[in-house]
Amino acid sequence: RFIRRSGILAAYSARSHWRLCSSYEKEVTDRMDATHPNERRERKDAQRNLERVLSAAQELLAERGADVTMEEVARRAGVGVGTIYRRFPSKEQLFAAVSHAVCADAQHCLQEAAQAEGDPLLKLRALVLVQYHRCEGQAALLELRPPAEAAGGATVFDQQLYDAFHAMLRQVIVDGQRQGRIRQGDPAMLAALCLEVLSPRAFNNLTRVIGGRVEEIAEQAVHFVLGGLGAR
């Protein structure tokens, strides 16, 4: 029932690109003075430019990884490179802003998936499918490993996403255990094991080894996770 791209998955596809920019944009613009007309116009221009820059950076990072240059982002966004440097003095700061927005969006989509179902096993299916659809286009930007394990170090946003997803999975597992539908065991440990299967790294490896459409890979992951949890 979750394989078709409807409901949560369709909503994610329609809204995720907008949310990528909106969360970071709001934090920036809320600090700007909007009391005069000229300042309001300048703020709107800055918002539009910020949206273009973050969207372009997100697309390029997803396509090519961290080798992207500020000049390439500027060309994709249709703005001058100076516009980017005025907001983000370094490439690292720009990439951190993109990571922040992507992780916040990922958390939001996963929360929507969990809230849309009451049955714990259906919640697990929804979380796996939404996560794998995200990995399809954003694997380079969505690392779910704790920072201590991430090669080269990870940002605080990675840790927040990992913790949030872990908490969702842990709660679903606890609910399933209470209903006798998931085997007994430490929910925190079981949730951490599930996350190893749901990481972008695991998705990339599965895609490379078995190929196929994301729906087929996700369905295999669903069966594996549910089987490991002793779902019934």
Image: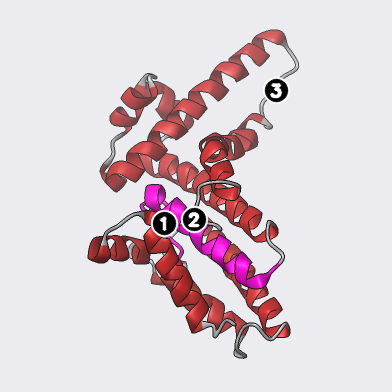
Q: Nearer the viewer, residue 197 or 149?
A: 197
Residue to which mark 1 is pinned: 215
Instruction: Tell me, yes or no, whether the two marked residues, 2 and 1, touch with CB atoms within 8 Å.
Output: yes
Residue to which mark 2 is pinned: 3
Residue 212's spot in the image, x, y percent? 30, 57
Instruction: Tell me, yes or no, whether the two marked residues, 3 and 2, touch with CB atoms within 8 Å.
Output: no
Q: Is residue 76 magenta?
A: no
Mark pair 3, 1: CA separation: 46 Å
Residue to which mark 3 is pinned: 33
Please tell me whether mark 1 sits on a helix, a strand or a loop: helix
Disc 3 marks a residue whose amino acid type is Asp
Residue 141's spot in the image, x, y percent? 41, 51
Disc 2 marks a residue whose amino acid type is Ile
Please tell me whether mark 2 sits on a helix, a strand or a loop: loop
Q: Which residues are magenta?
A: 119-145
* Placement of the N terminus among the 4 image quadrants: bottom right
